[in-house]
Amino acid sequence: MSTQSKIRSNGIVSWPEDERPRERLLSRGSHAVTDAELLAILLRMGVKGKSAVELGREILKRFGSVQGMMAAPLPAWAGLKGLGDAKLAQLLAAIELGRRGALPTIREKTVIKSTCQAAEYFKARLRGLAEEHFRVVYLNRQGRVLEDALIAEGIVDAVRPHIRLIATRAIQTNASALIAAHNHPSGATEPSESDRLLTRDLIAACQSISIRVLDHLIVTEQSHYSFADSGLLDELKLQVTG
């Protein structure tokens, strides 16, 4: 075994200082470290016989890329040796911070007054997810976001949000209106019959408590579908009132 191999087998702490990921990041900037090394900094320690960098490489190999890792559902992380609850929680927290960092601005200062603004907001919120997530933003009369809630998540075509929960949160936040959205990991933007029925039921429930449903968006990585812009929202409102 070479001297270099012996050094590396003893863990990152025994590496020359200019080779350690954390020290290199602090001295040269985050661009100077690899994806695996960034993961190693978050993991802090490896396991017996495996450095944190090697563990980072194993994680990337499992998911194929950083993007694949960010899109992976929680069950996909099971079985990675050396990745206990504490380390997994650190990684998932960092991933979620990165996702939230892509949002247009601080939630409490976000104002949504158009389909374009809503689409950009939800694309940032739902980007890179392997499962369907159904979210609702609750707005005041000026269109300011009061709350952004994840209502349901699951496998494609199996997400069925609880209408009562959506309405209850609207009352709790003192909202005047709401916009619903969910992602289609398949990339298809056309609403399914289930999407139509859900939107109709949501309109009916919100009308009874004087909450306006401004839109329901279906978002993908490349595009989006707006129930409001397509005219389908008005059609469903007529079905409810008629």
Image (cartoon, helix red, strand yellow):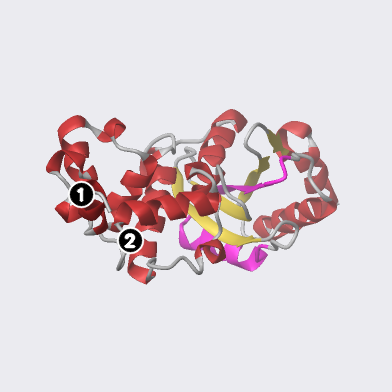
Q: Residue tagged by mark 1?
A: 3
Q: CA distance from mark 2 to mark 1?
A: 17 Å
Badge 1 crowding class, 10 Å Cα cut-off, few under 14, some 14 to 19, many 20 or more, is: few
Element type where label 2 sits in the image:
loop
Q: Position of residue 123 (x, y in %)?
A: 56, 38
Q: Amino acid at mark 1?
A: Thr
Tell me how many marks there are.
Answer: 2
Quarter holding the N terminus? bottom left
Q: Which mark is residue 71?
A: none
Residue 115 appears in which quarter of the rendering? top right
Q: Residue tagged by mark 2?
A: 50
Residue 168 appears in which quarter of the rendering? bottom right
Q: Nearer the viewer, residue 146 or 31?
A: 31
Q: Nearer the viewer, residue 216 or 14?
A: 14
Residue 176 visible in the snapshot: no
Residue 52 visible in the snapshot: yes
Q: Nearer the viewer, residue 3 or 76?
A: 3
- Identified at 31% across, 56% down, the residue is 52
Q: Position of residue 26 (x, y in %)?
A: 17, 38
Residue 29 is left or right of residue 109, and the answer is: left
Residue 220 is left or right of residue 87, and the answer is: right
Q: Name the residue furthest front.
A: 1
210 falls in the magenta region: no
176 falls in the magenta region: yes
**For the residues bearing labels 2 and 1, Cβ distance under 8 angstroms:** no
Q: Position of residue 231 (x, y in %)?
A: 79, 35
- Identified at 33% across, 61% down, the residue is 50
Give the magenta range: 161-187
